[in-house]
Image (spheres, rainbow, N blue to C red):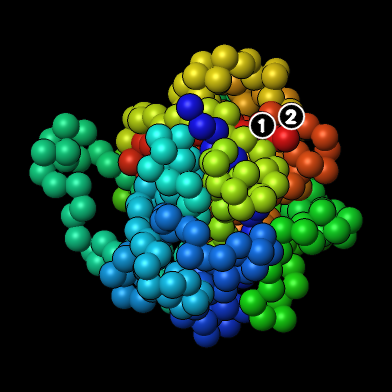
Amino acid sequence: MTSAYLIDAVRTPVAKGKPGGAYSDIHPVDLHAHTLAALVERVGLDPAEVDDVISGAVGQIGEQSGNTARWALLGAGFPESVPGVTVDRQCGSSQQALHFAAQGVIAGAYDVAIASGVESMSRIPIGTQFQGKDFAGSRVGKRYDNGLIPQGISAELIAQRWNLSRTELDEFAVESHQRAAKAWKDGLFDSQITRVTDLAIDETIRPDSTVETLAGLRPAFRADHWVERYPDLEWRVTAGNSSPVNDGSAAVLVAGDDAVRRLGLTPRARVHAFAVAGDDPVFMLTGVIPATRKVLAKAGLSIDDIDLFEVNEAFSSVVLAWQRETGADLAKVNVNGGAIAIGHPLGASGARLMTTLLNALEQTGGRYGLQVMCEAGGLANATIVERL
């Protein structure tokens, strides 16, 4: 059986996903195309060698609809013979794209594949694809007694179940900003970045954040109808301890043994194991816990065998609850900051986290890295890579 190797990975600096953000005037296809072109250029790969481009996007409507991966690869100048497909596993879409690419290589269906993702939240605001419609249907509504809720409320329920204080949530958020700011200052992101505009660093990092300033923020999701439904909630989740809305793109090149030899590629890591898990769709964001256990079991590793973790910081409460359940050392988690600081451009985040993890393993000399992401609907993807 062939192995699936990570040859290279690249991302844009992450921009504010609002009007006036650095990429708000850029069509998402063009943003995505820039990263795909940068990836093959960095490797010196003829794009005609790519068997498929598998891309994640969450807001698949308007400018991000119609199989946006296909248009992005054409925009990047790839030959018309190169196919592309767009997947939706919500926030884990481009991590799922990486799983599909690796599975294709291992199965022998692909020699070379690209896993990538894009999200332009400035042009396709979060939730636009739902347009106020009921997306779950009556049968799901009956199963959960019409109790499905937004992610922000799920984050509040998690904070309550794991008894996470507002101070703990804010302290974690401040640490994310400090780590990301230091990583940029120390040049740790330089090798993974392709610039699109004059934006040189991630636009939402706030190095001057303090627990005291975050303590002054109001709960972001408290509203009368939610207070009525959940009268015992303490309402600890704010904009400060949640990920912002963002624009960005990232891409990872995956190849098998034959392609590595034939094309003279240099693998940087091997995909060691991957898993996807489902969990309670009301708590929604706790899928990272069973997904972590599942991927460790598949890999035959323990939590202590992992040198670095990338756990998507959709909310502070998600990562802290995950840590409580897994026992992971927080000093190894998101060592260069996470989504609370760097940003969370939905469909691009899975590939962005892998890009960051790959570079961090090389910078620290670690062997195994584990990436896990919570996803809407109570899902989570987990991936373990081995640095070579």
The picture places residue 119, in percent across and down from the top left corner, at 47, 65
- What residue occupies the far left of the structure in this picture? 138
How many residues crowd mark 1 within 10 Å: few (<14), some (14–19), many (20+)? many
Residue drawn at the location 20% of the way across and 47% of the way down:
136
Mark carried by residue 386: 1
Horizontal side of 91 relative to 360 (left or right) equals left
The picture places residue 290, in percent across and down from the top left corner, at 46, 23
Type of the residue with mark 2: Arg
Badge 2 is on which residue? 367
Q: Would residue 285 be seen by someone viewing this image from the given angle?
A: no
- Residue contact at pointers 2 and 1, CB within 8 angstroms: yes
In the picture shown, does residue 273 fall above or below 351? above
Q: Quadrant of the C terminus?
A: top right
- What residue occupies the far front of the structure in this picture? 262
Helix, strand or loop for disc 2 = loop
How many residues crowd mark 2 within 10 Å: few (<14), some (14–19), many (20+)? some
